[in-house]
Image: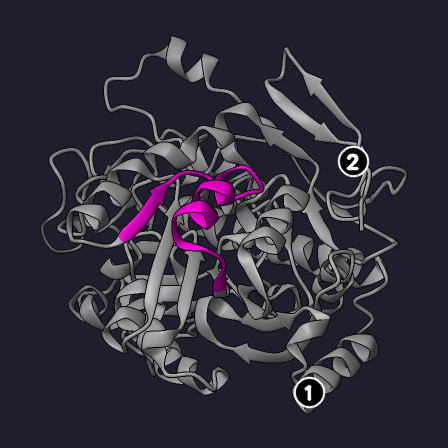
Amino acid sequence: RAMRGPRLEHDDEGGFTRFCDCRFCGYGHPCVEVINFGLTPLGNNYLKQDSTQADFENERRYPLTLMFCPECAALQISAVPDAQLSVWKDYMYLSSAILFARDHFLEYAAEFPSYFVSKPEDVTVLEFGCNDGVFLRPLAARGFKVIGVDPATKIVQDLIAQGFTVYDDFFGEESVGRIVAEHGRVDAVVTSNSFAHISDMHDVMLGVVNVLKPEGFLAIQVHYAVAMVEKMQYDWIYHEHMSYYTLHSLRHFLRHFNFEIFDAKLMSVHGGSLRIFAQLPQGGRPVTDAVCKIIASEQELGVTRSEFYTNFEQKMAESREQIRKVLSDARGAGKTVLAYGAPARATTLSSYIGLDFMASHVTAVIDDSPTKQGALMPGTHLPIISSDVLRAGHPTIPVPDIVILFAWSWAHEIVPKNRDFLLKGGAFVVPLPTVTVLDAGTVVDPPRAT
């Protein structure tokens, strides 16, 4: 059904667009604020090593406010920085470089044939937000005809060179015109972990409607907002993630376009994910019990009320004070404190704890990615260095006494491979879901969120 889009206001001085209405329900449906992180830098906007004081002072910070729509219960960021919209063309995150991601999509591809009566070679699947082909490859290996769409030019060019049909573009109503002209309509449209990154949700769904066969289906995988709350994963919230989903909010939005969810699955990947399958009326597939069970569970939890998230903020504040106390006690005792991990979510965690506080209590940030080493963290401007510092120190930094895990969801991998650091008297601090100190005297079974 035709909908009038949300009201938008552009802040020329601040360099961002503010949504005055829900990006899903559109005009006349304002949201209410549930969590305000204040002004924060972009999570992946690392500064160069030779940045000057003037560069620090000119670093842009944008409102990071989580809003709740009383109409559809969708969670969303109200301000979209202009700079964020240009990030995707130069995006260099490679999903296939992550072992658990490869395994996850291999398993997904193995399940995929069960959703079709036809043989894979007679089925065309379009994936938008295909990244480096982490899902396209195993689908193609099983015989499916695949088409990818992604605006990350460098990544897409590599896939094209390998013989894949991939469009270097944003997915939407305009871009699918070319796809339909060249390939016809497709049997399935899939997307994983990209629905959170889209500002104009209506344009994307019009693209789906125009490229999908009437009897086909849409499969969407997203981070699950309930898992974010239950596992205290508030570092999920940053500008790149514009929306946060429950089954209820997804169902409400898709019904605007005459789609009905017929299957759903909760998964542990990425700290808690939701995968749904939706169809137009011509699809005719029965709705599974899983859909009904998840909806009932969400209703019982109260996800359709803003209080579910404002209560979450109260627990966040308690978590912040616990983290501050651990770091303050360490610095007060003259200990050297480093952090481990420089993902975008580290910027949210630092911003919420306090950028100035973190800059004064933490000396540097360890990251295993050579592309990040030598850069400076957004907001705190802490140097990013290799994990060699845990064994031999650094030219200007001694072996630390304590390391707070910004990449805490990878604690199950980081801690065991750095056990010698613990045996020599060091300690890791896992900040979330609850503050946990791991040292040589601890039975190391760190929490995992993947």
Q: Is residue 74 left or right of residue 367?
A: right
Tell me where residue 102 appears, x and y as whole percent.
28, 69
Q: In the picture shown, does residue 342 fall above or below 427?
A: above
Q: Looking at the image, which is closer to me, 179 or 94? A: 179
Q: Looking at the image, which is closer to me, 232 or 356? A: 232
Badge nearest the viewer, 2 or 1: 1
Sequence order check, earlier mark of 2 and 1:
2
Q: Is residue 424 left or right of residue 295?
A: left
**Magenta span:** 165-186
Tell me where residue 348 appears, x and y as whole percent.
52, 44
Q: Amino acid at mark 1?
A: Pro
Q: Say whether residue 183 is magenta.
A: yes
Q: Say whether residue 76 is magenta.
A: no
Q: Residues within 10 Å of mark 1 (few under 14, many from 20)?
A: few
Q: Which residue is mark 2?
A: 6
User: Which mark is on residue 286?
Assistant: 1
Q: In the picture shown, does residue 286 fall above or below 377?
A: below
| Spatial CA span between label 2 and label 1 | 33 Å
Q: Amino acid at mark 2?
A: Pro
Q: Residue at x 55, y 65 (%)?
A: 220
